[in-house]
Image: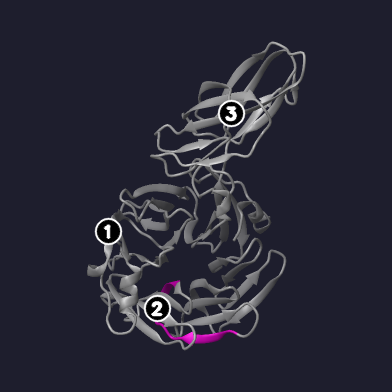
């Protein structure tokens, strides 16, 4: 597991960028032109496909894991166990296939799957592959179970339309985003559907599922190129869609609570003003014992990796998106004598509202609280003291100026700001701060 904090070495060549949603931050690392099928292994190692080679890159040196005889289009790279990857490609000579690729040792071609597109590990020793095995003109796309030992193929579902992406949740339910067979695709035609783990298991061997067996969870997406789950059950989708008026949607959207009673669609990343499009998404989880989840304004936790490609120039880069928690500063710093002082919180929700709480005592460990009606937990350090309402400006800054009457002894103080965004749907807190009155 990775913590957001240790992703910094992975993104050592960071570039400034601000297209992500409020409450998040992102960093960029350049990848070789034309790189595809990206997979991050740890804080430094990234795997990508160059067109002929599957490469392991630690930021300072590269090592080839697989070399193909001819040029190919990379479809996917997934991790099937600690030391082994599964790589899929469509080749120019028609020998489309999937390869089992050890991180140490010789790779082997596992199976031939025409026009393979996406894959996901379903259970140990078994992966599911989305592929247009009947060719581009076929009415259906196939979902195929692949045995990682024998390479045996077992079609478990036939879904109408072009190839769509796959995702699996913690309960082994299978999610699929449909794709229109028409080109250009009409807007709003993509559904996100779910096959239960029991349905998938029942289709192993004889039998095959169809869209009639699936539960439709969300309708009306324009496109969904790749899918990934975050650490609290939200489904993230990479969208590249060309509208009839010539405009292009280049974004990553979040379907919050996709398996619950009230799924909600929000935009997490918008690349519309750049030539780049999101090609791949991967969520990197953190240690959940700390309590943070991938939500705006949270403490450090997991991160979303987005491979972005400029299809005209071939330029490729890797973006890491993580939560950005607001910070609180006290001016003047340190020991504050008699006179005014200012407590300011920056990086909060633009035009949001909050309470600034200040009271005596040293900084203590925050509690992780669940508040009804909010998706994200609240990190809060309970204290007795003064609670002052604050309003955040358009840049997400709020402040209050207080007066110290002067004390005959130093008094340790602490402060923290609680807030909700303008819509009243996102709850958060700034990191607590300490100062001393004298």
> Could you give the CA–CA distance between mark 1 and mark 2, rounded to whole angstroms?
22 Å
**Magenta region includes residue 115:** yes
x 72%, y 24%: residue? 436
State whether residue 219 appears in this view. yes
Q: Split into 4 quadrants, where in the image is the C terminus?
A: top right
State whether residue 297 appears in this view. no
Q: Are the two marked residues, 2 and 3, in contact with CB atoms closer than 8 angstroms?
A: no
x 47%, y 56%: residue? 230
> Could you give the CA–CA distance between mark 2 and mark 3, rounded to whole angstroms?
60 Å
Q: Split into 4 quadrants, where in the image is the N terminus?
A: bottom right
Tell me where residue 208 appears, x and y as whole percent. Answer: 27, 79
Q: Which residues are magenta?
A: 107-121
Image height of 34 relative to 373, above or below: below
Tell me where residue 28 appears, x and y as whole percent. Answer: 60, 53
Image height of 188 relative to 177, above or below: above
Residue 219, quarter of picture:
bottom left
Label 1, secondary structure: give it: loop
Q: Which callout, 2 or 3, points at the residue further toward the start of the chain?
A: 2
Labels in figure, total: 3
Q: Which mark is residue 383?
A: 3
Q: Of discs 1 and 3, which sits in the foreground?
A: 3
x 47%, y 50%: residue? 271
Side of 21 where 165 appears, left or right: left
- Near mark 2 (Cα within 10 A), the count class, few <14, some 14-19 or many ≥20, is many
x 36%, y 83%: residue? 154
Per the image, the residue denoted by label 2 is 115
289 or 347: nearer the viewer: 289
Per the image, the residue denoted by label 1 is 189
Q: Which callout, 1 or 3, points at the residue further toward the start of the chain?
A: 1
Q: Of discs 2 and 3, which sits in the foreground?
A: 3
């Amino acid at each position: 597991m990775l913590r957001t904090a240790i992703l910094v070495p992975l993104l050592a060549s960071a570039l400034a960028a601000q297209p992500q949603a409020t409450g998040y931050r992102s960093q960029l690392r350049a990848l070789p032109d034309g790189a595809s099928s990206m997979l991050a292994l740890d804080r430094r190692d990234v795997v990508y496909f160059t067109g002929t080679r599957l490469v392991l890159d630690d930021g300072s040196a590269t090592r080839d894991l697989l070399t193909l005889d001819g040029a190919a289009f990379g479809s996917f790279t997934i991790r099937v166990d600690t030391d082994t990857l599964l790589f899929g490609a469509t080749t120019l000579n028609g020998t489309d296939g999937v390869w089992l690729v050890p991180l140490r040792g010789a790779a082997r071609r596992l199976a031939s799957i025409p026009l393979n597109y996406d894959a996901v590990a379903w259970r140990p020793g078994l992966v599911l592959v989305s592929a247009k095995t009947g060719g581009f003109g076929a009415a259906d796309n196939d979902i195929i179970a692949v045995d990682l030992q024998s390479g045996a193929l077992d079609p478990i579902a036939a879904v109408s339309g072009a190839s769509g992406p796959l995702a699996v949740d913690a309960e082994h339910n299978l999610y699929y985003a449909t794709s229109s067979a028409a080109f250009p695709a009409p807007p709003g035609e993509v559904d996100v559907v779910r096959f239960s783990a029991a349905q998938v298991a029942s289709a192993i061997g004889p039998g095959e599922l169809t869209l009639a067996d699936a539960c439709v969870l969300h309708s009306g997406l324009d496109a969904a190129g790749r899918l990934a789950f975050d650490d609290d059950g939200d489904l993230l989708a990479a969208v590249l869609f060309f509208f009839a008026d010539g405009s292009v949607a280049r974004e990553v959207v979040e379907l919050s609570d996709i398996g619950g009673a009230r799924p909600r669609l929000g935009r997490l990343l918008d690349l519309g003003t750049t030539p780049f499009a999101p090609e791949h998404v991967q969520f990197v989880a953190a240690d959940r014992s700390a309590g943070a989840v991938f939500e705006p304004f949270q403490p450090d936790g997991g991160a979303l990796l987005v491979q972005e490609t400029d299809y005209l120039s071939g330029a490729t880069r890797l973006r890491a998106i993580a939560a950005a928690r607001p910070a609180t500063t006290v001016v003047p710093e340190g020991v504050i004598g008699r006179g005014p002082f200012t407590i300011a919180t920056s990086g909060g929700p633009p035009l949001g509202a909050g309470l600034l709480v200040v009271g005596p005592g040293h900084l203590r460990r925050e509690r992780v609280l669940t508040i009804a009606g909010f998706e994200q937990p609240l990190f809060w350090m309970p204290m007795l003291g003064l609670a002052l309402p604050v309003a955040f400006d358009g840049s997400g800054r709020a402040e209050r100026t207080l007066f110290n009457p002067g004390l005959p002894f130093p008094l340790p103080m602490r402060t923290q700001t609680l807030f909700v965004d303008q819509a009243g749907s996102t709850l958060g807190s700034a990191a607590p701060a300490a100062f001393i009155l004298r």
